[in-house]
Amino acid sequence: MKRSSFIRGSGFWSLPAILLAIIWSPLIPAQPSASEAESLVTTYFNALVQGDTATIQGLLGGDLLESRKPLLDNPSYAHMLSTLYADATFEILGTKSLSHNNIAVDTRITLNPEEILLARFIISLAADAKTDVLKIIDEQEFEE
């Protein structure tokens, strides 16, 4: 009886590797794209302008969410945000891949001609129970 060359050849060992990759691939989050990260940060900025603390809370994750939660739960914080960012302009300067799950989005936020903030938002692709969700997990100041 002649055995299949698939079993005798190196292809036999690739089958388990292929099956393992298929099984595990949904469990390994893909890297967030630059456009997805930029969209998330734009949504965040719009929420700041509107004082929409519920949206802001939904966009933040990790330690950043924990540290901002007391402010976001304060009813007067929404008004303070909308007042502070009412005339602000927002510009995305660029993105940079940091790791498999993280991407940085550099921004310039101009509150007024004398007050310009350079903020780097770290976006992470965190797997939850059903889908992959992007969250802002850190905000840092930087210099050009």
Image: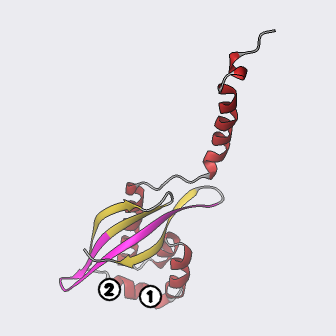
Kindly identify the amino acid type of the residue bearing the numbered disc 2: Leu
Q: What secondary structure is the stretch in magenta mostly built from?
A: strand
- Which residue corresponds to mark 1? 77
Toward the left, the furthest residue is 113
The residue located at (71%, 21%) in the rendering is 8
The residue type indicated by label 1 comes to Tyr
- Residue 43: name its quadrant: bottom left
Point out the tag, 2 or 1, that comes first from the N-terminus.
1
Q: Which corner quadrant of the image does residue 9 belong to?
A: top right
Q: Which quadrant of the rendered structure holds the N terminus?
A: top right
- Image x and y of residue 103, in percent: 43, 62
What residue is drawn where x is 59% and y is 55%? 131
Residue bearing mark 2: 84
Image: 82 above or below 31: below
Relative height, residue 115 to residue 138 (above, below): below
The quadrant the C terminus occupies is bottom left
Q: Secondary structure at mark 2?
A: helix
In percent of width and height, residue 36 lies at 42, 57
Q: Position of residue 4 (x, y in %)?
A: 72, 15
Closer-to-camera residue (25/39)? 25
Residue extending farthest right: 1
Quadrant hosting residue 126: bottom right
- Tell me the magenta residue range: 107-128
